[in-house]
Image: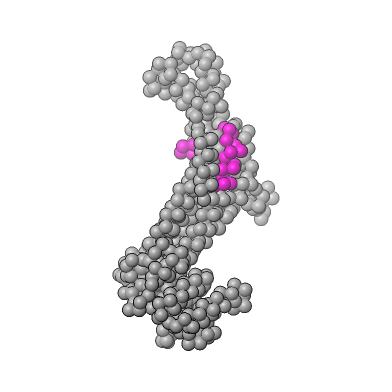
Amino acid sequence: MNNLWGGAIADAARQLNSSIGVDCRMWREDIAGSLAHAAMLAKQGIISQADGEAIQAGLLGILEDVESGKLAIDMSAEDIHTFVEMTLTERIGDAGKRLHTARSRNDQVATDLRLYTRGQIDELLTLLYDAVAAIRDKAAAYKDAVMPGYTHLQRAQPVTLGHYLCAWAMMLTRDAGRLADAKKRLNQCPLGACALAGTSFPIDRDMTAKALGFDGPVLNSLDAVSDRDFCVETLAALSLLMTHLSRMAEELVLWSSLEFGFVTLPEGYVTGSSIMPQKKNPDMAELIRGKTGRVYGDLTALLTVLKGLPLAYNKDMQEDKQALFDGLDTAALCLGVLAPMIAGMTPHRSAMRKAAGAGFINATDCADWLVEHGVPFREAYAIAAGLVHQGKPLEELTLDEYRAACPVFDESIYAAVDLDACVKRRHLPIDEELAFLEDFLSGK
């Protein structure tokens, strides 16, 4: 298949120049953009109504045939735009040659990429909602399961698994907001900018923008063809999303180890060892953690491509799609695993409770009790620290041992250092958190 610009280049150069191996996935978007453009050309009298109808019918035929598998995308074409236009011309003749009137591949590819990214964000948001729902359900089921909270990976203070999991869900709600914001900003149509300076034909940019579901046309023609902010912003949002997924994955790896024993991951999301029959490796969580760096690399790659480019379009920008598509694919793959993995995991209340009881995580509550009974906090802190250094769980100290450290202590200290009481006194807003997540999910 020939190229659209009619020149000839060396084989090695052709391989370097070709992008169809990457942009072929935008065939639906390319046809959609061409359908809107052709309808506008016919309405404006730039092409005849008959040619417009022929183009519309031809494009719909290509769409149907590619979807059914009857027509294979020709990977020898320079790009997906070349494939669609040349296939159209082969099928309908000279009318197909009129499709590209008042359009450049520069505004065409920018439009296709915005359409594709918008659709992918919608799919990612669905996956995000699924993940939040899975976490919400597990948090609700274990909202009273006491476990240690950590700082510096050291047992710190008692919380519940429900409260802990809600922290994961809160991260994802912010990720959803960032992706939704990125979608809002990208939802402007580049069509009509042509190569960089618009066109002398009397086009209707509002018509094509509306037909494609955009909020309106990109105002500045130079910006329309050279802007890839929406790609960068999407990758930035995905990078932060992957940071959150990686942190969750790390905790699942730790929690599912024998050393912690807090959860058992579902069978479909662990693997065995080739030589150690007893192993259940948390490979899916580890892969999510590992693939995070891949998305970071995609963001860095695209920023590096763009950083020195003059306006308007430059061929360097052909590299935008590989980075963006890889980031989108990777995030979708990881989210698609995360939700069912969390939904299927089995938390172990007794193991979490045992860990909570072994790390003096009620020492702050002991100090707080002293403060409530008139002891200055710094003195109370030192007294509680001295009790901890004895090495005996605070619940098991005798009242005489308490009073040897400070005569203010009385029997009510035992209620204060009880783990369940410690959690209740903190008024962890688990019901409010679950309600917030329910509202978030209902507003999708």
In this picture, is 156 found above or below 97?
Answer: above
Q: Residue furthest left?
A: 310
Q: Nearer the viewer, residue 206 or 132?
A: 206
Residue at the (41%, 62%) spot, across then down: 215
Residue at the (62%, 35%) spot, across then down: 349
Point out residue 135 in the picture as x, y percentages from the top left corner: 56, 44
The answer to whether residue 319 is visible is no
In this picture, is 407 found above or below 356?
Answer: above
On screen, residue 128 versus residue 111, left or right, reads right
Point out residue 438 in the picture as x, y percentages from the top left corner: 54, 43
The answer to whether residue 126 is visible is yes
Q: Residue furthest right?
A: 277
On screen, residue 351 versus residue 79, left or right, reads right
In this picture, is 150 found above or below 401?
Answer: below
How many marks can you see? 0
Q: Which residues are magenta?
A: 132-153
Q: Nearer the viewer, residue 190 or 386?
A: 190
Residue at the (51%, 38%) spot, across then down: 433
Q: Nearer the viewer, residue 389 or 68?
A: 68
Point out residue 317 in the picture as x, y percentages from the top left corner: 39, 70
Q: Is residue 141 magenta?
A: yes
